[in-house]
Amino acid sequence: MQFILYTTGRCNLSCKYCGGSFDPSIVPWRVEYRIGLLDDLIKSGDVVAFYGGEPLLNIAFMKDVVERFPDARFVVQTNGLLLDRLSPRLLDSLSTILISIDGREAVTDMYRGKGVYRKVLNSVSAVRAKGFEGELVARMTLTCHSDVFSDVMHLLDIGIFDSVHWQLSFVWVPIESWPDLWQWIRESYMTGLRRLFGEWLARLERGELLGIVPFRGILKRVLRGGPIPPCGSGIESFTILTDGRVVSCPIAVSERWAFVGRLGNVSRSDIEKRKPIVEEPCKSCERLRTCGTRCLYTHLERLWGIEGVEAVCECSKFIIDLIENNLERIMSATSRSRLRLEDLLYPEYNNTVEIMP
Ligand code: SF4
Ligand code: SF4
């Protein structure tokens, strides 16, 4: 099980995709429940991910949780600006740090604010310099201004991040903000993806494994399957908001379908019994096993209507086909290198990365 704990609804940035802090009447800026109530849900070996708002604005809560659950694995999703506030002990307790950065400087700063790219990189470099041995994941949002090949390769070439993953900013921003959505999908995104995959495979043939999350994560799902949706929301991943509400997806802070219960009234066995929600067109889709509806939130909310569903599907099918149609090449590249197939499959545990972009 994975538990995503909001430490606050407040954020110290106001990025164009989400607009910054939550309204405190929806997601309070302080944790309002007794920490002891988490004992009903979190068990030894679970993953606990700190989330917000900006989670590092409430380091005291993170510290209390880490001390209370010494046998859990800890993850944080952060904008990276406050990483220097983590004590060496707390830093040492984290297995994965996911940092929001969109690729090249101009693209990152366009959405996240001037100077953010530099500050984030300085802060992430300092974490490595302090001896952090866990995984550093760059977490990109892709928009019509992104170039998937250049932006992903840029982040990998910096040499600090172990892995890079991205989410298409479909549905989070108005559809009108994409001047020509389908042209971008076919001429920019798909062309760039093909090139990026070619680079990943060429390096693999030389024995080098690039940490491109969707390629490795989809490969794992093709070979081994996995939860539906791939992030596990609502079946093996639950989010606890600062007011003690338990919801299935961290984004769905006020959607009725996402409400699971309240801390104190919901038990571990209640959540373990939950089944995936799959509606059409995913229910009868032949790629459901791999794609897994891509994202429960977009699957149910459909904020861009039919066109949004089609855009998501077109991109999902394309990237799945890229892996499936090249399975033999991937296997033969792996066997010629010193890598084992197991080394390619990602993630080792649910570290909150979203596999399907
Ligand atoms: S490809 Fe489209 S229809 Fe198929 S499972 Fe994914 S989102 Fe659903
Ligand atoms: S992929 Fe979708 S359902 Fe899963 S956590 Fe992200 S927004 Fe929620």
Image: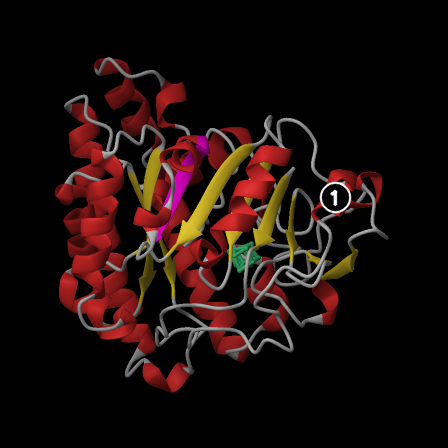
Please identify the residue farthest to the right as the structure is shown: 265
Q: Is residue 237 left or right of residue 166?
A: right
Q: Which residue is mark 1?
A: 36
Overall secondary structure of the magenta section: strand
Viewer-nearest residue: 302 or 263: 263
Viewer-nearest residue: 40 or 236: 40
In the image, residue 244 sits, relative to residue 128, either above or below, namely below
The chosen color scheme is secondary structure
Q: Position of residue 30 (x, y in %)?
A: 59, 64
Q: Position of residue 158 (x, y in %)?
A: 14, 44
Q: Position of residue 314 (x, y in %)?
A: 42, 62
In the image, residue 222 sits, relative to residue 19, either above or below, namely above
Residue 95 picture quarter: top left
As shown in the figure, which amino acid type bears the numbered disc 1? Gly
**Which residue is at 47% across, 61% downward?**
313
Residue 66 in view = yes
Quarter of the image for the N terminus: give it. Answer: top right
The residue segment tinted magenta is 93-99
Image quarter for ligand 1: bottom right
Q: Is residue 142 left or right of residue 275?
A: left
Number of marks drawn: 1
